[in-house]
């Protein structure tokens, strides 16, 4: 037994993670259900480092130093349970099983409890960055016990992306915390992508600009506050030309966005926790709307616009307005996502450090961005911060762009350009800062038809009015 870490599941992700471990000097045990993938890894990358290939799970486990560290990188769901079942009889107390696939966090909670009962550590780990990240340095979000992180953490940190020398990997929290944070990361990614798409659409319809011209605007934006991987690739994509037709690539792509489900999980969990993650929800529903083919056909045929086309006289000012609206909406989406992490952390006793999460998302992952530094700083200033938007840096940054944000949302509405994430983010902003909300009326209605009771602004207690009787107020 000489391997320091093992990887089972050698499709694109597992293969690249194994190569990443090996390139960092670790001796890596490798295994896959069908040996062909193990063989192909050895044939094509075997000289990159020290690999110990095994055909059987038993040989694979036997090739690992104790306490064994086994990384599972298979298709999320039943395949993960199948691999765990195969591993269990072969492992010994204190061994560490790492699930680096995209598991749904309730599955991770269940698996962690089951393995803990058998004296094993189960580390549900979010890994972001796709194929390239896995090979060159992903963002890694490991959950599980702190004890397991003591020996596993340094290895994961070594292969993670680095920003200013700091690893994009840290201990997240017990149980399902790692996969939970990865899920919210993906939800935020949905919101970020939708906001960028809305900005593109506004520029396209407002300016009548070509994809390439808008691509240049995004490239310009990528030199400022908005600097991020997603803005950078947007600039590239928009400037890409379809080889076959010579048309702008984005113009020949069918406008129906698909999803694999992490956005949906995030929204479902937001509903369960009662956290208003409107940016992520709008982004997920916008994808659903784009794919609602019969509804869109019917809508296109029947629904009038009664809209007034935008007449942009100062193009530069309009571009700057859209940029500010995008930045402000983005802050809202992140603020909501971090609220969701805080709520889940409190509910599950995960004690997640939100500033540290922003720090490990600065590199390797899809939402990597300069602006995450500002989020880390905000939570360093106040670890208990209840609203990211209320951190002085963000209050100022969003405040400066507020008039522009309102103009853009109003222009979108006037011109009939759908901007669900821009406009709902602004509504959230106005809702969360409101002195008084019409929720008072909702409570009154609820008491009227369902005797659900209400509280008063002027004294404690809960009350019910006898609406069908003499309308006197009763202490409930
Ligand atoms: P896939 O998700 O395509 O899974 C293929 C792997 O699962 C193969 O190694 C396959 O073995 C194995 N497998 C299956 Br399917 N059923 C199995 C079973 N019952 N027992 C044992 N092994 C089984 O691979 P991937 O795209 O590399 O992704 C791996 C994980 O990483 C997934 O959970 C994914 O969601 C996650 N992830 C992917 C990305 C990405 O960008 N692709 C990013 C982040 C996370 P075989 O070769 O014998 O069929």
Image (cartoon, rainbow, N blue to C red):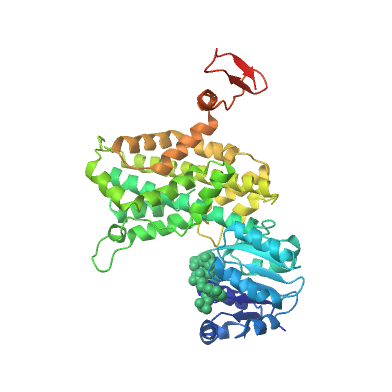
* Front residue of 444 and 255: 444
**Residue 252 point in image, percent of width and height:** 28, 60
Does 108 appear above or below 388?
Answer: below
Whether residue 164 appears in this view of the structure is: no
**Residue 95 point in image, percent of width and height:** 73, 72
What residue is shown at x 58% (from left), y 51% (from top)?
Answer: 373
**Residue 437 point in image, percent of width and height:** 52, 27
Does 260 appear above or below 54?
Answer: above
**Residue 393 point in image, percent of width and height:** 58, 40
Does 305 appear above or below 97?
Answer: above
* Front residue of 68 and 354: 68
Can you tell which quarter of the image residue 403 is in? top left
The N terminus, quarter of image? bottom right
Whether residue 406 appears in this view of the structure is: yes
Does 458 appear above or below 254?
Answer: above
What residue is shown at x 23% (from left), y 65% (from top)?
Answer: 245
Number of marks present in the image shown: 0
- In the image, taking residue 207 as reference, residue 21 lies left or right, namely right
């Amino acid at each position: 037994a000489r391997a320091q870490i093992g990887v089972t599941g050698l499709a694109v992700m597992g293969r690249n993670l194994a190569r990443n471990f090996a390139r960092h000097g670790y001796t890596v045990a490798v295994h896959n259900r069908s040996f062909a993938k193990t063989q192909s890894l050895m044939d094509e990358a075997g000289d990159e480092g020290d690999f110990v290939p095994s055909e059987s799970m038993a040989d694979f486990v036997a090739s690992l130093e104790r306490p064994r560290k086994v990384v599972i990188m298979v298709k999320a769901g039943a395949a993960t349970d199948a691999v765990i079942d195969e591993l269990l009889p072969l492992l010994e107390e204190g061994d560490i099983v790492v699930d680096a696939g995209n598991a749904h966090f309730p599955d991770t909670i269940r698996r962690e409890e089951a393995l803990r009962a058998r004296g094993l550590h189960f580390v549900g780990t979010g890994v972001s960055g796709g194929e390239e990240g896995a090979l060159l340095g992903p963002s890694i979000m490991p959950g599980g016990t702190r004890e397991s992180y003591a020996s596993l953490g340094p290895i994961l940190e070594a292969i993670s992306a680095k920003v200013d020398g700091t690893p994009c990997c840290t201990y997240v929290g017990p149980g399902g915390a790692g996969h939970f944070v990865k899920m919210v990361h993906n939800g935020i990614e949905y919101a970020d992508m939708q906001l960028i798409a809305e900005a593109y659409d506004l520029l396209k319809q407002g300016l009548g600009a070509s994809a390439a011209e808008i691509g240049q605007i995004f490239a310009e934006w990528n030199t400022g506050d908005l600097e991020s991987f997603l803005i950078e690739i947007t600039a590239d994509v928009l400037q890409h030309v379809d080889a076959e037709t010579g048309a702008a690539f984005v113009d020949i792509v069918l406008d129906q966005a698909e999803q694999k489900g992490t956005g949906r999980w995030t929204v479902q969990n937001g509903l369960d926790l009662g956290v208003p993650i409107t940016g992520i929800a709008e982004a997920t529903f916008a994808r659903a709307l784009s794919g609602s083919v019969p509804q869109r056909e019917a809508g296109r045929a029947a629904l009038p616009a009664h809209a007034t086309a935008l007449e942009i006289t100062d193009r530069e000012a309009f571009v700057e307005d859209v940029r500010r609206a995008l930045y402000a909406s983005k802050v809202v989406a992140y603020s909501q996502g971090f609220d969701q992490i805080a709520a889940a952390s409190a509910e599950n006793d995960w004690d997640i450090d939100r500033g540290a999460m922003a720090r490990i998302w600065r590199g390797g992952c899809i939402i990597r961005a300069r602006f995450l530094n500002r989020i880390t700083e905000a939570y360093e200033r106040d670890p208990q911060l209840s609203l990211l938007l209320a951190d002085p840096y963000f209050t100022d940054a969003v405040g400066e762009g507020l008039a522009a944000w309102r103009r853009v949302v109003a222009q979108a509405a006037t011109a009939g350009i759908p901007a669900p994430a821009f406009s709902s983010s602004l509504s959230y902003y106005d809702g969360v800062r409101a002195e008084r909300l019409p929720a008072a009326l909702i409570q009154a209605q609820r008491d009227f038809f369902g005797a659900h009771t209400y509280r008063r602004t002027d004294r404690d207690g809960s009350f019910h009015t006898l609406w069908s009787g003499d309308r006197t107020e009763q202490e409930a």
